Image: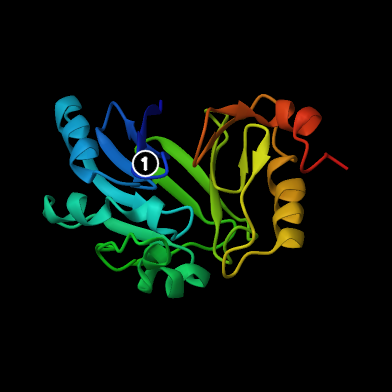
Amino acid sequence: MLEIVSFCLGPVQTNAYLIADPQTREAAVIDPAWDGHLLLAEAQRRGWRIGHLWYTHAHFDHIGGAAAIADALNPLPLVALHPADHVLWRAGGGGRLFGLPIDPGPEPSIDFVHGQILRLGSNVFEVRHVPGHTPGHVLLYCAAERVCFCGDLIFAGGVGRTDLPGGSWESLVYSIRTQVYTLPDDTRLLSGHGPETTVGEEKVSNPFVQEY
């Protein structure tokens, strides 16, 4: 079983997800966007132990809360990021370009690769490399729970921007068609901004990327 607590945090209203196996109380944060103390407080309230920080990509608004979380934990959580986004992470996620310099927190210690399997208690996640918004963007898919954490690849009725350094419209479209639209239609899409949607809904109504 997977429990998911959603937060909307920071200067650009980024979604962060605190997830856990309630039986083992093992927890992870997917994209600790901002205000790490809020994520910590909720985990502590529920008796969950945060052992992992999983980044869909390294933009500043998706990692801005990592330092506060790590500073409060011993041992440090394991941090996972695709290696193609390490340069972006070292640059503080590009926050200075927007006047928002951040402490990116602990250095990533796990390199995401396409097809990698992650486990959180009894829950299994598949990592899919989906470049386009950033070179190292990934999504995390839990088939048993029919849920996909898709970062800034695709939104309800929208897609991630590709005009920032490392972005590629062609790669973004290809990633959505091959790695999102191939999932079951009832799969929930939990993105980096805005409300959740489903694969089936986006295949028929997303104005930016049609199924084919």
Q: Position of residue 175 (x, y in %)?
A: 70, 53
Q: Quadrant of residue 138?
A: bottom right
**Picture layout, residue 24 above or below residue 114:** above
Element under disc 1: strand
Which percent across, then down, holds residue 156?
63, 32
Position of 112 with respect to 10 (left or right) is right
* Residue 95 x, y percent position in the rendering: 38, 62
Residue hosting label 1: 120
Q: How many marks?
A: 1
For mark 1, does the 10 Å Cα neighbourhood hold few (<14), some (14 to 19), or many (20 or more) residues?
some
Residue 47 in the image: x percent, y percent?
A: 16, 29
Extreme right residue here?
212
- In the image, 202 versus 181, the foreground residue is 202
Residue at (63%, 61%) from the top-left corner? 131
Q: Give the colouring mode of the picture.
A: rainbow
In this rendering, would 189 be left or right of 60?
right
Front-lying residue, 24 or 138: 138
Residue drawn at (43%, 62%) of the image: 81
Q: Which of the 4 quarters of the picture holds residue 49?
A: top left
Judge whether 20 appears above or below 115 on screen: above
